[in-house]
Amino acid sequence: MKTRNHSSAFYIIRDAVIAVALSAAAVAIVTLSIAGSEENRRSENLRIIENGVRKAAAECYAVEGFYPDNIGYLIENYDLHIDKNSCIVHYSPVSSNIMPDIKVIAK
């Protein structure tokens, strides 16, 4: 009966290849997880900005009885802050008594 010599070059190379492959797989999984969480963070930030614009518009309607014609009115009078470097806010008024169409898009 033959016994294998575990110190032969073949087994050393095989074990090294397996170790490198497992390490590469672990690095790939971590990288994909980080990229996915970054995308989730961006999406959440856009959602928060959109909700803030909607809240400011609703507050304006409740206090003054109309939805403003432009977002600048909300920025000046309702403490609305928007990071113009990270997103574009589409604010399209319909009527003074109908909630405007509000969309926030990442730059």
Image (spheres, helix red, strand yellow):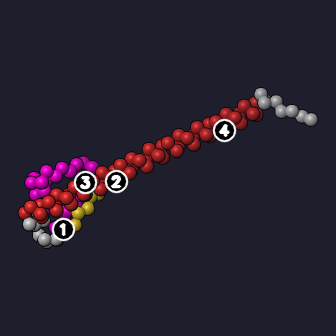
Numbered circle sitting on residue 43: 2
* Spot occupied by residue 7 in the image (x, y as percentages of width and height): 77, 28
Kindly identify which residue carries mark 4. Answer: 18
* Spot occupied by residue 34 in the image (x, y as percentages of width and height): 44, 44
Considering the numbered disc 2 on the image, is that residue within a helix, a strand or a loop?
helix
Q: CA distance from mark 3 to mark 2?
A: 10 Å
In the picture, measured across the screen, residue 32 lies left or right of residue 61, that is right
Judge whether residue 71 is colored magenta: yes
Q: Looking at this view, is 40 or 60 the one in front?
A: 60
Among the two numbered marks 2 and 1 on one chain, the one whose residue lies closer to the N terminus: 2
Q: Which residues are magenta?
A: 69-93
Q: CA distance from mark 2 to mark 1?
A: 23 Å
Residue type, label 1: Met
**Residue at (16, 52) in percent of width and height:** 80
Classify mark 2: residues with Cα within 10 Å, few (<14), some (14-19) or many (20+).
few
Q: Nearer the viewer, mark 2 or mark 4?
A: 2
* Spot occupied by residue 9 in the image (x, y as percentages of width and height): 76, 30
Judge whether residue 63 is colored magenta: no
- Residue most extreme to the left: 64
In the picture, measured across the screen, residue 3 lies left or right of residue 25, that is right
Considering the numbered disc 3 on the image, is that residue within a helix, a strand or a loop?
helix
User: Picture quarter containing residue 96?
Assistant: bottom left
Kindly identify which residue carries mark 3. Answer: 49
